[in-house]
Amino acid sequence: MSQHLIQTDVKSTLSTAEIAAIDAEIAHLPYTSAAAIDALKIVQAARGWVSDECLIAIAKHLDMSVEQLEGIATFYNLIYRQPVGDKVILFCNSVSCWICDCDKVKERISDLLEIDYGETTTNNRYTLLPVPCLGACDRAPVMMVGDDLITHLDDEIIETLFGPNQQAQSD
Amino acid sequence: MEKVLTRNIGTHTSPVDLKAYEANDGYRGLRKALTQLSPQDCQSMVKNSNLRGRGGAGFPTGIKWSFVPQGDARTPGHTYLVCNADEMEPGAFKDRLLMEYDPHQLIEGMLLSAYSIGADIAYIFIRGEYAVAIRRLRDAIAECYANGYLGKHILNSQFSLELHVHPSAGRYICGEETALINALEGKRANPRAKPPFPQVSGLWGRPTIVNNVETLCNIPHIIDRGPEWFNTLGVGEDSGTKLFGVSGRVNNPGCWELPMGTPIRDIIENHAGGMKSGFQLKGFLPGGGSTDFLVADHLDLAMDYNVIGAAGSRMGTGTLIILDDRTCPVGMVLNLIQFFAQESCGFCTPCRDGLPWTRHVLESLESGAGQPEDLETLAYQVKYIGAIGNTHCALAPGAMEPLQSAMKYFYDDFEQHITTAQCPYRLGRGA
Amino acid sequence: MPKIIVDGQTLEVSQGENVLQACLNAGLDLPYFCWHPAMGSIGSCRQCALVQYQNEHDTHGRLIMGCMTAVTDGARFSMDTSNAVEFRKAVIESLMLNHPHDCPVCAEGGECHLQDMTVMVKHRDRRYTGKKNTHRNQYLGPLIHHEMNRCITCYRCERFYQNYAGGTDLGAQASRDRLYFGRQTDGVLESEFSGNLVEVCPTGVFTDKPFLADYSRKWDLQSAPSICGGCGVGCNIAPGERYGRLKRVHNRYNHEVNGYFICDRGRFGNAYVNSQKRLNYPGLQMPDGRFKAIDHQAALSRAAHWMKNKRVVGIGSPRASIESNYVLQTWLGAKQFCAGFSEREGALTCGIVEILQATRAINPSIKQMESADAVLVLGEDLTNSAPRVALALRQAVRNKSIAMAEQIGIPEWQDAAVRNLAQDALSPLIIVSSAATRLDDIASHVHTLAPNDIANFGDVLIEHLRGNISEDVDIINIADCLMTAKSPLIISGVSLLERGILDSAAGLAETLYDHNPHTMLSLCAPEANSIGAAMLSHTDNLSLAQITERASDIDVLVVLENDLTRRLDPTSMQQLIASGTTIIALDILENETLNHATLALPAASFAESQGTLINMEGRAQRFFPAFKPAHERQPSWQWLLHLAALDGHGELSKIIHFDEIVHACAQQHSPLARLTEVAPDHSFRRHGQKIPRQTPRYSGRTAMSADLSVHEPQQPKDLETPLAFSMEGVNQNQPAALKSFVWSPGWNSNQAIQKFQAETQKPSVGVSSGIRLLISSGKGIPHTSTDRTAFAQSNGWQLIPIQCLHGSEELSAYTDEIAELAGDPFVALTESCALELQVAAGDGVILSSNNVNLSLAVKIVARMAKNCIGFSAGYTQTLSLSAGSHVQLQRDPNWRPFKPLVIASDRRPNAQLRHNRHG
Ligand SMILES: Cc1cc2nc3c(=O)[nH]c(=O)nc-3n(C[C@H](O)[C@H](O)[C@H](O)COP(=O)(O)O)c2cc1C
Ligand code: SF4
Ligand code: FES
């Protein structure tokens, strides 16, 4: 990794906007490395995921080793170290949603999009991931598609979101 | 009943902004404290209010604050206040409401708490999925900075506070206060050993108070209206009001502010509208996924910390999860154990390796491959993982609570899985 | 002393320790994994559980972790109550869920702490029916093998690698039961201390790769107490042999010196013992330049013939033992003897001895250095020149955090808590050097100066401390750090070959001593026995220059374990060879001097012979042979005794045994009078028996040589030492200097060391290994303010020697793995210099001066004194370069590009890191 670290030029890997956003976080933290998670999220927000190259560039910018940053990146489940689709479906499969038959809803999504947990549709539109309880148990089953919380899931909602019509429409 | 925490939250449409918040007596507590009360006065008021932490453990807030070194014991440097807005406990959905619809209440709570403990920097550690709450909190904070409620010399007093929102990158363990501190420091969120307690050595080694969103939202009212008033709010042993919620197969799942000590039956039958037709109540987790099951016999208990504790469970977050008679208790426990095994930070052995083992046993039961000795194994796991102190933090013991109580109340169900070599509920659920 | 009660038994314990330590110290077998005596507790494995009772009426108690619980007077515990027993068993059962059943093929098998603990808790039957988790292994370089499936997640590797040794490229990744310990991607581990992972890991995740390739079971190794010859620190090691090969080297605990850890040169750099380049037989050079193998009789008679009535001169060696050097000097007389140093080295090493014999400051042991709360390093990159010292300084800088913790009642062993409290607060470490050092990341101040300016800097500091107040803010700051410290440490050495640096280090220590009698002064010597050679040397001795200049007057030159090309400039070497002197050279491996010898005598290596080495502190330590020298190899002292006898030396011809040399030497050299006490002599017996070199389970004694003979060969006799080349004997309570291996019933891994210590982290039972021979008179060193010239700008670049852990040391460089890591010889430049020369890392430059033209790789370093460039010191290819000389540089257009030589952890100095207002 060390070789990459030398070769990676932070400025040509990260955008000025990303660097500025990271620096803004650093500005109110006592140690640069304390911005690690923020930095990963900033870069991910811009690119959907954190590639090796970006990981290395961030590590360099924060003056920490790639190993240390990787240890952090791989700890948190909302940091993606693999490419994801345009939108990530965070599907709640925790207890209240489970009681409300979320498994069936998930099957429906899997059928329509032809993906299981951890997979991305071939058209790269969606990645399906399970997520811990989304804190909307009174509206179970729920999921997030991108930043949107979608509640009271049933076949109809799934159909409108991911059904062939919808797919055809935006294709 | 008087609405306190949710007085600005009526219609669930849009949040109150600064103007509207001020108009409804907002920041009155803060003004009072900054002009009339010393930090010590505020601490005493909170102590006298008997407010207990709403994050799950119910630790008295005033006492917790008093552990922050004061006077001569104080070393130079910052003191931090952290709001725990991680809310990832399965079945918990109360903090979201408070943050999405009345962000200023939380900010005022944090201002007052920070003032009381002498903190000059505060963080809201919020789960990343709460995109709406994050946005609304940030907007509200911007309003505060613009209007002298945050920053240097707040309302022209000597008191200054910086407030940042830190959206988390996921993981349930981040809700554990010391893991949260590691996460805030930008590290892997393994919990820390206690002692030293965060009050003495927390964020960046400095004195730190971590409080739950709901806990903090109570503070403005306690300061504004006094501890005696607060004490009268509860209808049982505990004081104040609480957000109670119900999820599962009830007619009207939701979250309501009710007096502490409201009977469980009242919550389930009146507020949640009772069980959906065709479903019977078989049991319930009184306060989220890491509390012990209670059953119909317990419906008349008051939602008070000690009452629920004496019944063998915990108040936890106060959001009830209902197990109905057509849902498999083994399956429900498996879902929970799966969650906890997945969310284990991996630091200590019983949790890291014991939970997946427990999951494996429950999976074989559910799939009909269970063996009689599996029940012994489960009991053994409960004993070995379930006791506080056996593991490094409280995640694993919490994980064992539903299992342990399910085996107590629904032992027949476990046995039937083995004797019939299948899950008896499968057909009922129409799977 | 507080007392605690464990299962009814009252234990006297030390204030401040934890219950696990207390139990282990009392000899109780309480299992553990994540705790390490040198690294403290984190409470992750949960293996060391006991039940604690509130008082004598409490019958229930509650489970606690021994390692996380401080002892308090009167506290009551139980290890044996079923609750605790069951819990500990449950922990092992969990750890074994995913652990592969590969003990038969695991390199750790038989010395595995996990095996031991599993047996200890009596876990046997597997109840879990699920699949095991598996991981991908990584390539971690030539030294360490990675087998992640065996991991039990104790975090020791990460904690050692990052927290203890300051490495950054290995750590924990992922979480839950998918935790992974490794690098971000495959690659060579960067830490100089990576080899300790082998011993720190309680199972077989990190194993010794070269050993794995030439494997034997631990119990089949024959070992002996030994001393590393890699540098002047003198770490204690345990080489293990089988089939006549040195199989591996393990750390051997010495409380005062290396404790639990050694560096990678020491662990992996000794495999030259098995090198193809070893000399097996005496070689006689034929007229065609080739060597003819002859037997030792023939060799000796030839030599006797040449020497008869001739002028014979001997050249000793700072890497050979006291005893060998002593015999050579005694035989030929001080006037015909040269200690074997180059002029510069000799002056410097004798300088160290003079200073340490006079200074009032404390000359600390390596362990004592860890207690320093302010450190000033003058002119050394310790990680590369005295690695174990650098590791000690990494602990010393933590004293600030330990003091902070103490203030709020956190004990030192609460490792994570101490680190969380202190964050990056470190005690001051001031580094004044000519180039970047591997301790820069923890330095509070770094100054980059040319060698003579380092001395000047020291002098200014001295003057400032003496009241001639400087206006330089840095000087004021540094002086402040040193003056306010409880135990300041000044540390320097000879890497830059600049005497002035030593003097100013000594002057600083003396000046500080006036204010603080706890001031420490440590000076690093370059080679394993530099100090010993200097202590033996005599004013009448010849210098190497005198020998080369008047070589033609010398008939026979006896060279003891010394490759003169490393000491002489090429012209002088040429002169010596051309003189036609008959050279008799004793050495271990082929080298340039041997190539020019008339007679080459095969010397036994450290692993096949015994001797005493005196380390940088002046501590004499004895090494013992792990196995008998093969072929015609003999310990140098034995060759020399034979030669001396043939030469008719009266006194020496009476000597046969090693111990007699020791006695004679002790008698004749008063500073070495206590040489006899360094280790027990050959007559030492425990319960009437010798100390075994083989473990009780040593196997295959008959089978090992069954291809040659079915009769069990007789075990070789050892008349020279109290050790036996067998498993017979008593391996109990002997002095630490005679501990060949650690093993105790139930404790097969290196963790067994605690069974030989009065207390963990404390000295071993019995006399400590080694005796301080260099004792200061305490006279003090008079202050003379030297007027040194400031570094003068001249045309060209001044050459600065850069010490390299892998590559700079002569013998270890013969080990394949070390040679691989050493890489190509290089020129070290800063980024801006490189820009100026239009080169980048991995390019080549041509370095030229009057008599050399060398093409070398470019290595980029973070800092380098102005107008200076570094060169890889000690590499055979750069031996012709002379430190301090001036050279021209230009880009080499014909250079083949290869891998860049900067590694990730060559980071910016800590002092330059961004610190904001929170701090
Ligand atoms: C595994 C685990 C997860 C937790 N998650 C949360 C959480 O999401 N929100 C919260 O407020 N407290 C959570 N807690 C409790 C906190 O550790 C802490 O007790 C709480 O934030 C204190 O706030 P309070 O005193 O205001 O209740 C969790 C505890 C554990 C052991
Ligand atoms: S109990 Fe689980 S979550 Fe808590 S420290 Fe141990 S492994 Fe981590
Ligand atoms: S040794 Fe005590 S918990 Fe690991």
Image (tube, coloured by chain):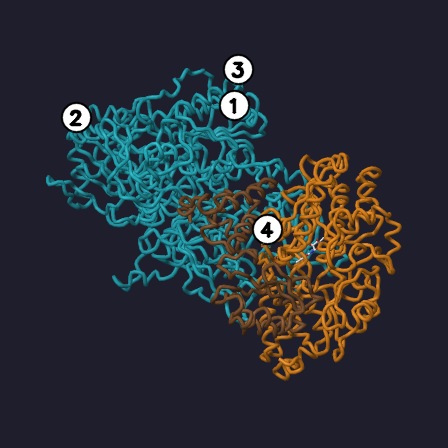
Separation of marks 3 and 2 at Cα, in angstroms: 54 Å
Q: Identify the secondary structure beneath mark 2.
A: helix
User: Which chain is disc 4 placed on?
Assistant: C
Residue nearest the observer in this picture, C891 or C902: C891
> In the displayed structure, does residue C191 sit left or right of residue A30?
left
What secondary structure is marked by label 1? helix
Label 3 element class: loop
Q: Is mark 4 within 8 Å of ligand 3?
A: yes
Residue at which label 2 appears: C552
**Tags 1 and 3 on a common chain:** yes
Q: Residue C581, image x and y in percent?
A: 17, 30
The foreground one among B360 and C704 is: B360
Which tag, 1 or 2, sits closer to the chain's start? 1
The disc label shown at residue C857, or none = none
Ligand 3 within 8 angstroms of badge 2 C-beta:
no
Q: Answer whether labels 1 and 2 touch (C-beta < 8 Å).
A: no
Furthest residue in direction front, as rendered: A169
Label 3 neighbourhood size at 10 Å, few (<14), some (14-19), many (20+)? Answer: few
Looking at the image, tell me whether mark 1 or mark 3 is earlier in sequence order: 3
How many discs appear?
A: 4
- Display colour for chain B: orange
- Residue C217 relative to residue A89: left or right: left
| Amino acid bearing label 2 | Ser
| Image colour assigned to chain C | cyan
Residue with the mark numbered 1: C475
Task: Give the residue at mark 3.
Answer: C468
Label 4 secondary element: loop
Find out if the beta carbon at label 3 lies less than 8 Å from the nearest ligand 3 atom.
Answer: no
Q: Let me know if residue C835 appears in the view.
A: yes
**Would you name the residue on which mark 4 appears?**
C42
Amino acid type at mark 3? Asn
> How far apart are the alpha carbons under marks 4 and 3?
49 Å
